[in-house]
Image: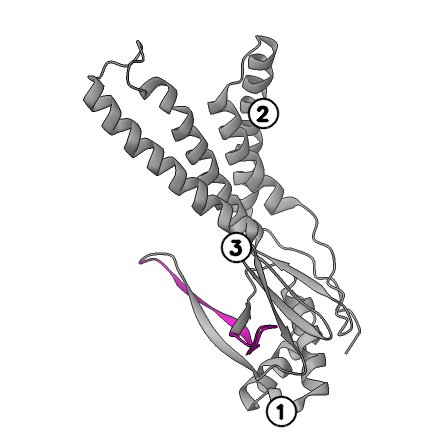
């Protein structure tokens, strides 16, 4: 139960290498523009945004992954995956850009070519759009769950719900789908922990491979099943058995 699986070497197809070269060249160009702007006493917002857009995927692709330590007695902190946080960062940049653009759109601004009424309407729409993008961008960064030997926690905005092992009602396994348009519709497993929180309100903690620490989470939940076998039905036990078998399968 507690043994860590053998670390598997990440394989990258040839297309990833070509993409990485392009990202490096683009990042270098944007970094030069940022430094050049700072030397001139200004901040080039477009170059800063471009540096984020190009450099972050490079780090997500090539940054070394630590080996998972599967310990049922550990407390695992679960957050949104790196690519989701990258996408939310794009939304944050867009929101900041729209709000920064309000300076030029404000009514009475001599640089605005619009009439006062048109500028007011455009300013309102731009401000609402910027605030919406900021909200969308912030949510993945505030997502935080944890699971340990005695409880699982779910944070919704600024409120944390706690599901105790002794009061949890069940574990279940479902399948969700990553909607990517007409080209692909990729299914992935999701593990749910149901039970009342500290106030007696029914809540659910959900864990899936697109979050951090999924393997460590499953190891802890296996410990829950050992201590309270009634939490898991046959489908959950079959899922854990298939997951363990996959860990023991040698990489090619």
Nearer the observer: mark 1 or 3; the answer is 3
Foreground of the two, 219 or 15? 219
Magenta stretch, main secondary structure, is strand
Circle 2 is placed at which residue position? Answer: 28
- Mark on residue 157? 3
Q: Residue drawn at (32%, 13%), measured in percent from left and top?
A: 109
Q: Residue at x 40, y 38 (%)?
A: 131
From which residue to which does the magenta span run? 182-202
**Percent of width and height locating residue 66:** 73, 55
Task: State the image coordinates of residue 177 (x, y, percent, origin top left).
Answer: 42, 66
Q: How many residues crowd mark 3 within 10 Å: few (<14), some (14–19), many (20+)?
A: few
Mark 1 and mark 3 lie on one chain; the one further toward the N terminus is: 3
Q: 43 or 252, which lies in front?
A: 43
Residue 42: % across, % down: 54, 13
**Percent coordinates x, y for residue 181 in the rendering:** 33, 56
Q: Nearer the viewer, mark 3 or mark 2?
A: 3
Quadrant in the picture for the N terminus: bottom right
**Other residues around mark 1 within 10 Å, as few (<14) / some (14–19) / many (≥20):** few
Q: Is residue 108 visible?
A: yes
Quarter in which the C terminus is drawn? bottom right
Q: Residue at 34% across / 37% down in the picture?
A: 128
- Is 164 above or below relative to 67? below
Q: Which mark is residue 140?
A: none
**Above or below for 95 versus 234:** above
């Amino acid at each position: 139960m507690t043994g860590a699986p053998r670390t598997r070497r990440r394989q990258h197809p040839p297309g990833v290498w070509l993409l990485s070269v392009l990202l490096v060249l683009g990042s270098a160009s944007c970094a030069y523009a940022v430094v050049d702007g700072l030397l001139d006493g200004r901040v080039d917002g477009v170059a800063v945004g471009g540096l984020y857009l190009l450099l972050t995927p490079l780090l997500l692709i090539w940054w070394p992954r630590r080996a998972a330590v599967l310990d049922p007695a550990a407390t695992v902190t679960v957050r949104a995956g790196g690519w989701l946080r990258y996408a939310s960062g794009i939304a944050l940049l867009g929101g900041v850009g729209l709000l920064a653009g309000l300076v030029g759109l404000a009514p009475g601004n001599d640089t605005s070519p619009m009439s006062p009424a048109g500028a007011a309407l455009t300013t309102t729409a731009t401000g609402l759009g910027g605030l919406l993008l900021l909200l969308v961008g912030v949510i993945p960064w505030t997502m935080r769950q944890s699971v340990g030997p005695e409880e699982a926690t779910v944070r919704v905005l600024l409120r944390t719900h706690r599901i105790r092992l002794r009061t949890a009602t069940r574990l279940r396994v479902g399948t969700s789908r990553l909607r990517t348009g007409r080209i692909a519709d990729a299914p992935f497993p999701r593990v749910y922990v149901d039970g009342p929180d500290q106030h007696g309100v029914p809540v659910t903690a959900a864990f899936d491979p697109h979050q951090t620490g999924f393997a460590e989470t499953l190891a802890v939940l296996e410990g829950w099943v050992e201590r309270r076998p009634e939490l898991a039905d046959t489908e959950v036990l079959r899922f854990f058995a298939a997951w363990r078998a996959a860990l023991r399968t040698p990489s090619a």
